[in-house]
Image: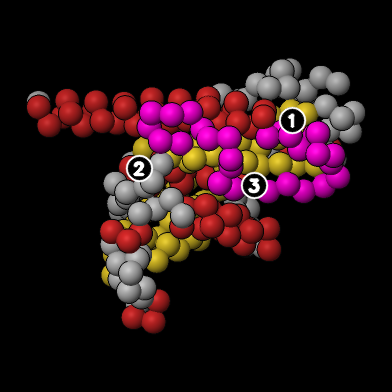
Amino acid sequence: MGRPDKREPGQIRALHCALGQLNRADGSAQFSAGNTSALCGVYGPVDVKVYDEKLDRALVEVKFRPDIGVSATKDRWVESAVRSTFEREVLAHLHPRTLVQINIQLREGDGSVDATVINATTLALVDAGIPLKSMIAAASCVVLADDTTAVDPTQEEVDAARSTHTFAFSSSSSTRPQSGPVYVDSRGDFTMDEYNRCHDLCAMAAERVLAFMRTVVEGKVTKEALISTA
């Protein structure tokens, strides 16, 4: 069965990113995959309320707003996914008794929302200069009714899928994403073989996302270097 937008099963949509979109944030990124777009702003490290203070590390706080309407249970799940992923990656021990606040707004949702939000968060944290163990790249995949798998699904494909899977992979600046994901969310009816196929498709897609991220960051560094020497 062909895909609605004529892509191959392992083909991701076009990626776009703009850094520094929010003037009042310490760092920000708008990341888009096809028609799915998320804007992430990072504030911190800043002072934290005494009752939230952690003596040995920074508190990582995540707030997510959907593109339409008020927040629902599924939006709390996105917040939890981002928090659990980046609490382990932010070098929070370098800034004890402070707060790193991550605010995310979904600008447009057309499938692969979790992955897009995670990718936007990575680039916003980098833009803010928040120290990380490594960069995080995420991708989503679906198993369709005819048992085929498709990476970076649109919402139409998500709605028609038997199961959906999102994987986030950790990588240093000099290595490819590791085989073990740092975040997994699998839902629906699927076999272990289908799960493994989705894992492998997402791992390959995450490599391409990571390469794109590096290009974005390198462009930012080059631009800042040119400005400082002008």
Coordinates of residue 184 in the picture (x, y in percent): 64, 47
In this rendering, the label closer to the viewer, 1 or 2: 1
Q: Is residue 215 above or below residue 86?
A: above
Disc 2 crowd, CA 10 A, few/some/many (<14, 14-19, 20+): some
Query: Which mark is in front, 2 or 3?
Result: 3
Boundaries of the magenta span: 171-199
Q: Can residue 21 be seen in the rendering of this structure? A: no
Dot 1 or dot 2: first in sequence order is: 2
- How crowded pointer 3 is (Cα within 10 Å; few <14, some 14-19, many 20+) is rated as some
Point out residue 56 in the picture as x, y percentages from the top left corner.
Answer: 33, 69
- Kind of residue indicated by mark 3: Val
Neighbor class of circle 1 (other Cα within 10 Å; few <14, some 14-19, many 20+) is some
Specify the quadrant that holds the N terminus: top right
Element under disc 1? helix
Separation of residues labelled 2 and 3 (CA atoms): 22 Å
* Residue at image location 45% in from the left, 63% down from the top: 61
Residue for point 46% across, 46% down: 121
Q: Which residue is mark 2?
A: 126
Residue 71, percent from left and from top: 62, 62
Q: Is residue 219 above or below residue 160?
A: above
* Quadrant of the rendered image containing residue 14: top right
Q: Sequence-wise, which precedes: disc 3 or disc 1?
A: 3
Residue shown at the point (60%, 26%) measured from the top left: 204
Read off the residue under disc 3. Answer: 184
Q: Which mark is residue 197?
A: 1
Horizontal arrangement in the rendering, residue 11 relative to residue 98 (left or right): right
For the rendered model, the colour scheme is secondary structure
